[in-house]
Image (cartoon, grey):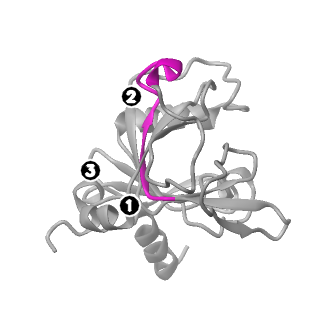
Amino acid sequence: MDGEEKAKLIADALSAAPTAVTKGAKVYAWNTSRQLVLVRAGDGPYACFASGNTSIRVGKPLSKFPDPMCLDQNALALFRAMWAEKNPMKPVHPYPTAPGMVWMLAGMGVGQGMIKIGTSGKANIAVGKSGSKITRLSPHLMIMPLPMAEKSSGLQSTYDPGNPNASWVMAAGSPIEHLMLHFSTEATKSMMNPHR
């Protein structure tokens, strides 16, 4: 990996969260061998990941929509546990239960069938080379695992393109269910550039 490629991966990873989070964060990226590689050392409490968690990591081409993320220590422990499982939806070992925070202010793309999509509004959809449809989700934070009972939360379990800033439960009823807190473009710009 040359210096220019590293710089691009770092810039992509850091687009997931404000400087208060990314300053001092370790930065990782997935290589074509599906291995996690440290591209920038750091001594802060967060770890940031360049786009590729839902694509390169599982042997697919990089998604048309970026999906960088920055994780606190609790979220990192959960992700490492999920990555260690052959099937994260049917874990052999119990997952950590302390709620963690995942910053994804660049949004993300999710493949058709991965989540429930509401019918109101128009979704931002791209079609991959294989013909699969990928829906772009708006900027968000994820709290995972879900720190409440999903059924009593009163939240939807569907992403609604007609109301893209609404909170909802992703992967409801599964071992990786989590809270999705979405933000408008204006709110995201304000978080990413707090001194402007």
| Magenta part of the chain | 138-153
Q: Nearer the viewer, residue 76 or 31?
A: 76
Query: Is 9 left, or right, of 59 in this rendering?
Result: left
Quadrant where the C terminus lies?
bottom left
Residue 184: assigned label: 1
Q: Which residue is mark 3?
A: 43
Task: Please tell me whether mark 2 sits on a helix, a strand or a loop.
Answer: loop
Nearer the N terminus, badge 1 or badge 2?
2
Query: Is 74 left, or right, of 124 in this rendering?
Result: left
Q: Residue at x 14, y 70 (%)?
A: 195
Nearer the N terminus, badge 1 or badge 3?
3
- Amino acid type assigned to the residue bearing label 1 in the image: Ser
Real-space Cα distance between discs 2 and 3? Answer: 22 Å
Task: Please tell me whether mark 3 sits on a helix, a strand or a loop.
Answer: loop
Q: Residue at x 48, y 32 (%)?
A: 155
- Amino acid type assigned to the residue bearing label 3 in the image: Asp
